């Protein structure tokens, strides 16, 4: 797919200059305009009409793209965005991606057509190239928990590796050695980083983890249950498991109870995210708190800066706004 950056490279100008030409700005010389239009013709580039419309219109809506708004984690994200939107007399439109590139792309394009010039996107399916092209055209687009090279100043992210390492160290410090991991079957960066943190913590203590210690399932309760059953079927003598998220951890609790395994007496479970369900499972889940509401508020404020965000944020920092998790203890610590 030909992008605006390809046109800029061909014409020997900046992306901003190409954008000004395509939006018929008077701040471009005739020679530059000709060079850009020649590049457009040569490459067969088709300008994004939606993005062009946003260049001249002010919107009272903020767009949000999440995996699935019915998930409690993403519900908390959207609620935080809405609280900021109300403070600015704006409304929120939501798109769901379901971890599919085509649906994620379509959701972003639909929100642009709806004149959302502030976008908060939790992207896991699109490539860095596609996201950077959208961000070139929409200065008010901010990513949550995804870092695109060259656009880190418009990314708000969590250190998943340190969070997973913290959870695993907590189990190690409580005497566990054989600690399994319940992984997401979706090929997303979050899972890879949490798996990395789990593995690093074990290696620090000289524990040689086997691939057989990893059970895989969809990142929901059903997936957690099936992943736990998978591990139990291998008869690995695990004493604890760290789950990709709280939903999978909750599913694991069900599988353990169905198999007559006392929790945490015979096997301990720790989750990640600290969504409401963690408090209402039996036993309650100890988990890694993911400050998604605070992150979403910061992302929304940044997106609302619009065109200024590109310059203001880049002067302040060249890296993403990074957040860190914290252990949320529940239940009897001595039995964990």
Image (spheres, rainbow, N blue to C red):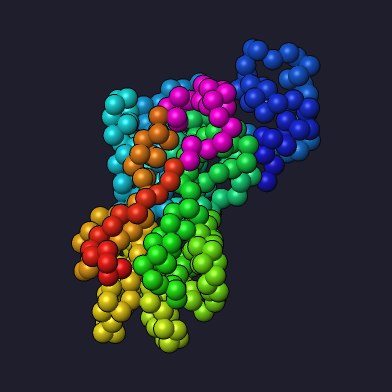
Prevailing secondary structure class for the magenta stretch in the rendered image = helix
Front residue of 256/117: it is 256
Q: Quadrant of residue 98?
A: bottom left
Q: Position of residue 271 (x, y in %)?
A: 36, 62
Give left or right: position of 7 versus 287: right
User: Residue 156 versus residue 29: which sits nearer the camera?
Assistant: 156
| Residue 219 is at least partly visible in this image | no
Residue at 59% x, 43% y is 148
Indicate whether 85 appears above or below 95: above
Q: Is residue 325 above or below residue 119?
A: below
| Residue 308 within the segment the image draws in magenta | yes
Residue nearer the viewer, 73 or 294: 294
First to last magenta residue range: 302-322
Q: Is residue 174 visible?
A: yes
Where is 335 relative to 58, above or below?
A: below
Q: Nearer the viewer, residue 298 or 236?
A: 236
Locate residue 289, reporting x and y percent: 35, 51
Is 112 inside the magenta-drawn segment? no
């Amino acid at each position: 797919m030909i992008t605006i950056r390809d046109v800029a490279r061909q014409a020997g100008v900046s992306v901003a200059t190409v954008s000004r030409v395509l939006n018929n700005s008077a701040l471009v010389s005739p020679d530059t305009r000709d060079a850009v239009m020649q590049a457009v013709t040569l490459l067969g580039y088709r300008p994004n009409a939606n993005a062009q419309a946003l260049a001249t219109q002010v919107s009272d809506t903020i767009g949000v793209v999440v995996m699935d708004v019915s998930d409690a984690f993403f519900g908390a994200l959207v609620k935080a965005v809405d609280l900021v939107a109300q403070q600015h007399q704006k409304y929120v439109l939501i798109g769901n991606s379901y971890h599919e590139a085509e649906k994620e792309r379509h959701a972003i394009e639909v929100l642009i057509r709806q004149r959302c010039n502030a976008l908060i996107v939790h992207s896991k399916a699109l490539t860095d190239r596609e996201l950077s092209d959208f961000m070139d055209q929409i200065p008010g687009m901010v990513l949550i928990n995804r870092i695109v090279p060259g656009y880190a100043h418009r990314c708000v992210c969590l250190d998943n590796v340190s969070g997973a390492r913290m959870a695993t160290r907590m189990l190690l410090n409580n005497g566990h050695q054989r600690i399994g991991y319940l992984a997401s079957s979706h090929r997303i960066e979050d899972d890879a980083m949490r798996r990395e943190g789990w593995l690093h913590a074990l290696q620090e203590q000289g524990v040689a983890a086997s691939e057989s210690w990893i059970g895989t399932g969809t990142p929901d309760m059903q997936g957690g249950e099936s992943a736990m059953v998978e591990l139990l079927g291998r008869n690995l003598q695990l004493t604890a498991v760290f789950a990709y998220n709280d939903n999978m951890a909750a599913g694991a609790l069900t599988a353990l109870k169905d198999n007559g395994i006392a929790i945490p007496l015979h096997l301990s479970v720790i989750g990640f995210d600290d969504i409401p369900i963690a408090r209402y499972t039996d036993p309650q889940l100890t988990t890694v708190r993911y400050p998604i509401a605070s992150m979403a508020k910061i992302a929304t404020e940044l997106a609302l800066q619009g065109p200024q965000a590109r310059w203001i944020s880049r002067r302040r920092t060249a890296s993403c706004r990074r957040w860190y998790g914290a252990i949320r203890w529940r239940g009897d610590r001595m039995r964990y």
